[in-house]
Image (cartoon, grey):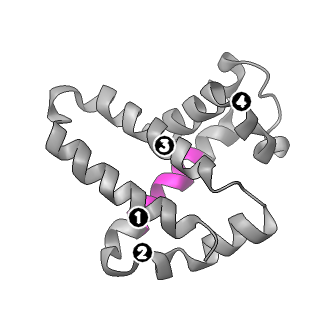
Amino acid sequence: EVGPAALSRCLVVYPWTQRYFGNFGNLYNAAAIISNPLVAKHGTTILHGLDRAMKNMDNIKETYAELSVLHSEKLHVDPDNFRLLADCLTIVLAARMGTDFSGEVQAAFQKFMAVVVSSLGRQ
């Protein structure tokens, strides 16, 4: 639920990110994006990727080496888009967690996401 919501938010708020998802079909408006099953599936895939990073906290960069090559060299994704998605993920988590998403939790999460974003950039 969090992954699909974060990716949907990113595609709506930053519409230029949609160019990487041309094969996802109808992304013409917010309702279409939110209800798109391919967006939801990829959002879930993204969260599974974050789970891999959490399980390999000592070497996130190596964990994401193949993903980094895929996104930078094959898909030519602007690395700044990972930061935008991380921001959307932070917003979705804050909304879902409410008061449990304290300043301390946010600080730790954003440090983690900064490492993830850096690791996904060109190696």
Secondary structure under the numbered disc 3 in the rendered image: helix
State which region is magenta: 43-52
Is any atom of residue 35 visible in this view?
no
- Look at the picture and state if 1 lies above or below 98: below
Is any atom of residue 25 visible in this view?
yes
Amino acid beneath label 3: Gly
Closer to the chain start, of discs 2 and 3, is 3
**Residue under label 1:** 115
**Residue under label 2:** 60
Residue 92 is marked as none
Give the alpha-carbon distance from disc 2 to disc 4, as whole Å.
28 Å
Q: Are marks 2 and 4 in contact (CB under 8 Å)?
A: no
Q: Nearer the viewer, mark 2 or mark 1?
A: 1
x and y, in percent, of residue 39 in the image: 65, 39
Q: Residues within 10 Å of mark 4 (few under 14, many from 20)?
A: some
- Look at the picture and state if 35 lies above or below 111: above
Q: Nearer the viewer, mark 1 or mark 3?
A: 1
Report the predominant secondary structure element of the magenta stretch.
helix
Amino acid beneath label 1: Val
Residue 3 is marked as 3
Amino acid beneath label 2: Ile
Q: Which residue does the image show at 35% across and 76% down from the upper left?
A: 56
